[in-house]
Image (cartoon, rainbow, N blue to C red):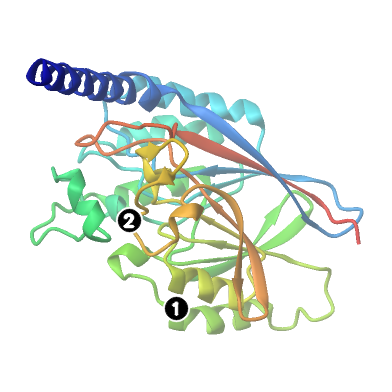
Amino acid sequence: MTGRHGIAVAAGAAALAGGMLAYGALVERNAFTVRRETVALLPPGSPSLRILHLSDLHLAPWQEHRIDWLRSLAELEPDLVVDTGDNLGHRDAVPAVGRALEVFAGVPGVYVHGSNDYFAPKPKSWLTYFSGPSRQHREPEHLDTAALEAVYERLGWVGLNNRAALLPVGDRLIEFVGLDDPHLRRDRLDLVPSALEALREGDDEGPETLSIGVVHAPYVRALDSLTTNGSQLILAGHTHGGQVCAPGVGALVTNCDLPRSMARGMHVWTRAQHAAYLNVSAGVGTSIYAPVRFACPPEAVVIDLVPRID
């Protein structure tokens, strides 16, 4: 009886694991959601501002269902789109990204790149993520990043890779500062103070300016830099929210040094005497070599900024 019982338990466990894998690959991976957040960050009496945060599209040319869903997000009527990178999921994905995002032409937008905007994904064991942040392959396949940037240029979006910019959004000016991907160590933290100093010069007597930080991978060093340099809201992606989460436990990995408890959602990031709201998106897609999500559905995020009550 003991042997038969053990075989039955093993068979049951295998069936459960198979069912979970099938659910994660066939159902939840395509169960696109819109997470909504409201943050009281604007000066009293200001009109509200709607931000659509997109991240980690990981698009492949054949993913029409994902493209159609992304296009439907235009119905949310955002005032601003912030794209935190990893939009390419295949060497031939640039036209797909163009089709998915063309509905936002004329809507103010900013972007930064993630590693998969530079290099194509390759097969790897998911177990490697438990040993620390993933590493770049020795001979990566370079993607057409310039063609991707041309898509953004047609939309009128502004690149923030190690740059700061002051952009009109509605009837207000917003200060942005962005970092190139920390996961690839392309972030130039040394450039942030001088870029912002040049942007802020001569603006001491102007109206209160909202400052937004943008980065793909939310490494601690990047969040600390953006926070201490005045960002009030930071938007990031990269983690996929853990992608495969354990109910009651949450994300098992973040693929960076961000605490697992902050792998997804709106948080407050503190550094010394400074603090910023931090939104980490679970992202829309997955690598074509790991097309599974569990207890972590794909998402776009709507952030409604509303006036503070001072």
Q: Nearer the viewer, mark 2 or mark 1?
A: 2
Mark 2 burial class by Cα count in 10 Å: few <14, some 14-19, many 20+: many
Front-most of 96 and 126? Answer: 126
Q: Which mark is residue 264?
A: none
Figure check: 91 above or below 65: below
Q: Secondary structure at mark 1?
A: helix
Mark 1 burial class by Cα count in 10 Å: few <14, some 14-19, many 20+: some
Please identify the quadrant where the N terminus is shown.
Answer: top left
Q: From this viewpoint, which residue is outermost toward the front?
A: 1
Question: Would residue 166 be found to the left or right of residue 280 on screen?
Answer: right
Report the residue at 44% width, 43% height from top.
250
Residue 246: which quarter of the image?
A: top left
The numbered mark, 2 or 1, whose residue comes first in the sequence reads 1
Q: Is residue 105 visible?
A: no
Across and down, in percent, residue 139 comes to: 8, 58
- Residue annotated with mark 2: 255
Mark 2–mark 1 distance (CA, rounded to whole Å): 20 Å
Figure check: 34 above or below 169: above
Residue 51: which quarter of the image?
A: top right
Please identify the quadrant where the C terminus is shown.
Answer: bottom right
Inspect the image, locate mark 1, and give the three-letter code of the amino acid beneath it: Leu
Q: Secondary structure at mark 2?
A: loop
Inspect the image, locate mark 2, and give the three-letter code of the amino acid beneath it: Asn
